Image (spheres, grey):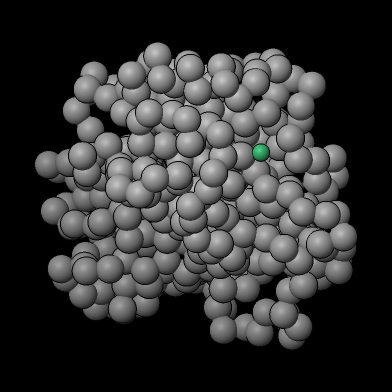
Amino acid sequence: MRLHWRWRGLRGLLVLALLLADLPALASSLAAWRVTRQGVLELRTTPDVALQAFYEAGDAGRGPRVWVDLPGAPQRTRSIRGSGSIREVRIGRPTPTTTRLVVEFAPGTRLDPRSLRLVGTAPDRWRMEFRGLDRPVLLGLGEGDLDRPSGWAAAPTTPFPTASAPLSADGLPVVPRGRFRVVIDPGHGGPDPGAVGIGGLRETDVVLDVSLQAARLLQARGVQVTLTRTSEIDLDLPPRVSIANRAGADAFVSVHANALSMARPDVNGVETFFFSGGPSQALASALQRRMMAISSGSPNRGVKQGRFFVIRRTVMPAALVEMGFVTGAIDAPRLANPDFRRRMALAIAAGILDFLGGR
Ligand SMILES: [Zn+2]
């Protein structure tokens, strides 16, 4: 079982200048770390660093592990003996340009991967809580100075991701294989690009990418998936509905991104529509909850009734998601980011599985 997520912090030239003064080129971007006695992992990194965090469950002889990969190589690899539930912390070099900080737990330690979040508290600060450790960490562990002022007096002007979502390819809800069928409807397509936003970001591209990924995730979990389109084709609304209704699906999800005027980058947010209450509303709520979990900082515009043709005329539980605004200052860069789209696909797949699992 493996949990994986990734964040990119802020970028800025000033930041780079500070960074270059601070560290030799290609040095590890990990400046300091510690694990407190309360079981909190804290990191200080160079700003604007792309972190990836992973989780792996233990087995009979080995405890679970959490590790974080950071750019740049450490000067030396090393392992530091832990105490209590933490067996060891290792600083490794899995590739010549990567630093890997591994927290290995004692065999038998139980960690709930859904509670693991790598949270950015400043552009150069991160923390992750290990909740519910059965044995205390008797001695705090660490290297480097974490209390050094970060030099970030002003609040960042760009929205800063405050928390990674607890997403996991394997942490998706489990449903019986072969029992369910789902239709995913990537909105627009072909000559109709849908909304076009900041940097020419096109709704059709975003929704197709996310839909294809969500479909693969569901298929891998034994759900039969029908996509109303798999490429840039022109597809009118009635055929989308007839594809769905013919499929005899348990759920229909139409995937969209919102837009307002380019003059309104202040408008951001995630919303989900249903037409009739009951199961459709439950589906919409599950999707909204999962999308919001990965969209920190983007307003929750809620679950609403809407009269969109594709959810009004489909005969199975149906919802239409708006994953964010391609014209929004918070949402647009995320929707343009392949990594965020991957997480959004996981969120949509998870929402669908939540709904199916609750049936
Ligand atoms: Zn749309």
Return the residue nearer the eye: 60 or 233: 233
Number of marks in the rendered image: 0
Return the residue nearer the eye: 105 or 112: 112
Q: Looking at the picture, does residue 212 appear above or below residue 255?
A: above
In this rendering, position of residue 68 left or right of residue 246: right
Return the residue nearer the eye: 319 or 61: 319
Q: Residue at x 57, y 78 (%)?
A: 145
Q: Residue at x 65, y 66 (%)?
A: 160
In which quadrant of the rendered image does the C terminus lie? top left
Viewer can see residue 10: no
Q: Looking at the picture, does residue 87 appear above or below residue 228?
A: below
Q: Quadrant of residue 40?
A: bottom left
Return the residue nearer the eye: 324 or 23: 324
Q: Residue 115 in the image: state x and y as whole percent.
A: 32, 61
Viewer can see residue 110: yes
Q: Residue at x 76, y 27 (%)?
A: 192
Q: Residue 210 in the image: state x and y as whole percent.
A: 57, 34
In this rendering, position of residue 239 left or right of residue 34: right
Q: Quadrant of residue 357?
A: top left
In this rendering, position of residue 173 left or right of residue 41: left
In which quadrant of the rendered image does the N terminus lie? top left
Q: Residue at x 84, y 40 (%)?
A: 200
Rendered-image quarter of ligand 1: top right
Q: Looking at the picture, does residue 327 appear above or below residue 18?
A: above
Q: Residue 93 in the image: state x and y as whole percent.
A: 53, 44
